[in-house]
Amino acid sequence: MSAPTGSRARRAAAVVVLIAGLVPGCAAKRFLGFGGDATLLVRHHESEPQEIRLDGAVLGVADSGMVACFREVRTGTLRLEARAPGNVLTRATSIALPPDQTRLWDIDHDQILEGRAFAGLCD
């Protein structure tokens, strides 16, 4: 015996509502940093090279007067640190790195900027 037509329509409507609710949720997770990689650029004019750390993990060293490029950086809301030799903290900040985008951290002015204009310096 088959189910009444009204019951099928309700089930179909429930499936449509469920799918419609999941799709934006997936997009929101990606935007909030749960997928993809970003590129982080760092510049400064300190007298000594700066070791760049992201949530405690060392990304590399940024030399003075140059733009350092760090590709395939994990995304999300993260803590950035610049440390001089001897593990001396120069500057720390919080950054939101969205997937597939480039951000520039200007240590001297403690600013996070759109980095597309500087991305060509990485090649």
Image (tube, rainbow, N blue to C red):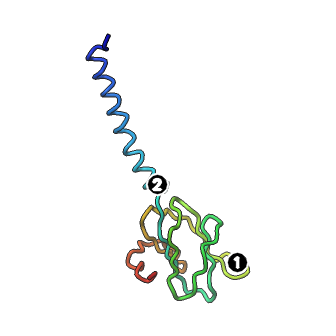
Which residue corresponds to the image point at 31% horizontal and 27% vertical from the top-left? 12
- Mark 1 and mark 2: span between their CA atoms? 31 Å
What kind of element bears circle 2?
Answer: loop
The vertical placement of 67 against 9, above or below, is: below
Classify residue 11 as left or right of residue 93: left
Q: Secondary structure at mark 1?
A: strand
Give left or right: position of 75 versus 1: right
Q: Residue at x 49, y 62 (%)?
A: 96
Q: Position of residue 32 (x, y in %)?
A: 46, 54
Describe residue 91's horizontal placement relative to residue 22 as left or right: right
Q: Position of residue 37 (x, y in %)?
A: 48, 64
- Quadrant in which residue 101 is drawn: bottom left
Can you say whether 65 is above or below 118 in the image?
below
Residue 65 horizontal side relative to residue 27, left or right: right
Question: For residue 25, which quarter of the picture?
Answer: top left
| Residue 29: percent from left, percent from top | 45, 50
Mark closer to the chain start, 1 or 2:
2
Query: Any mark on residue 88, and which?
Result: 1
- Tag 1: amino acid: Val
Return the residue nearer the eye: 97 or 70: 70
Among the 4 quarters of the image, the one containing residue 113:
bottom left
Q: Amino acid at mark 2?
A: Leu
- In what quadrant of the picture does the N terminus appear? top left
User: Residue, x 40% and y 41% (percent of image)?
Assistant: 22
Residue located beneath label 2 in the image:
32
Q: What quarter of the picture does the C terminus occupy?
A: bottom left
Residue closest to the eye, 89 or 76: 76
Furthest-right residue in this view? 86
In the image, is residue 11 above or below residue 46?
above
- Disc number placed over residue 13 in the picture, else none: none
Other residues around mark 1 within 10 Å, as few (<14) / some (14–19) / many (≥20) = few
Q: Residues within 10 Å of mark 2 (few under 14, many from 20)?
A: some
